Image: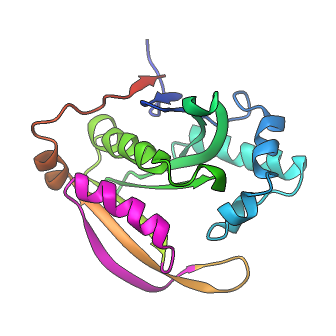
Amino acid sequence: MSHGLFPERIETERLVLERMGVAETDYFEFYDLVRREDWEASTAEMPWFRLENLGEVAEFVEVVDEQWRGRERARYLIRATEEAGELVGTASLLPEWDEKRAGSDIVLAKEYWGRGYGTERACAFVELAFEVLDLDAYYTTCAAGNERSKRMIESYVERYGGRHEGLLRQHSARPDGGVTDQHRFSIIREEYEAATESEETLACELAW
């Protein structure tokens, strides 16, 4: 049976990542997530995830669906099995096919910070990028001053042999007109293969 490039479901030890798309997503459930009281704090560094009404939710999902079909980005809703399958956030994998690399993003409701969910999701994405999508590098960034995200990124980048490349100054424009500095981290294939040589990889379950 043939299937698309991206798995529609990724199941790790404690998380289930489900494809976000027009046919797959319950708009009302996603709306409940983005209207949580702690969502504004959760999205302080990523205000584009602040959706004010169901119309904006529908537009967001429609764009996400087009990106998936165009093989530009794979966005998922994140459920935590420890939280009775509640939605806890969203994450995406962003392949850059010509450069043979992938980036990613994640936003979790603040209530679920500090539980290792971000790291668990990142490890699945790193292994998916190298083992399934045959890419040669994985990178990610976080805003300078966002120490919580920086520590999370450092933990899994170190695990896979990657490194902190440096601080990119005046790098990312924000909707309010500001521009932030960004820490950039990367893992290349040689580092990944050396770090995982004696380990089992892709322990997560993938379904297309």
Is residue 73 something that shows in the picture? Answer: no
Residue at 10% from the left image edge and 48% from the top image edge: 194
Question: 150 and 77: which one is in front?
Answer: 150
Magenta stretch, residue numbers? 144-172
**Is residue 50 magenta-colored?**
no
Q: Is residue 123 left or right of residue 173?
A: left
Where residue 166 sits, quadrant-wise, is bottom left
Q: Is residue 97 left or right of residue 160?
A: right
Residue 172 screen position, x and y as percent: 55, 78
Question: 96 and 88: which one is in front?
Answer: 88
Residue 165 screen position, x and y as percent: 28, 74
Residue at 47% from the left image edge and 50% from the top image edge: 118
Residue at 86% from the left image edge and 57% from the top image edge: 52
Residue 179 screen position, x and y as percent: 59, 85
**Is residue 159 magenta-colored?**
yes
Up/down of 78 relative to 166, above or below:
above
Q: How many marks?
A: 0
Residue at 41% from the left image edge and 60% from the top image edge: 152
Is residue 96 something that shows in the picture? Answer: yes
Q: How is the image coloured?
A: rainbow
Residue 151 screen position, x and y as percent: 39, 65
Question: 129 and 18: which one is in front?
Answer: 18
Q: Is residue 199 left or right of residue 181?
A: left
Q: Split into 4 quadrants, where in the image is the N terminus?
A: top left
Up/down of 181 relative to 120, above or below:
below
Up/down of 50 relative to 164, above or below:
above
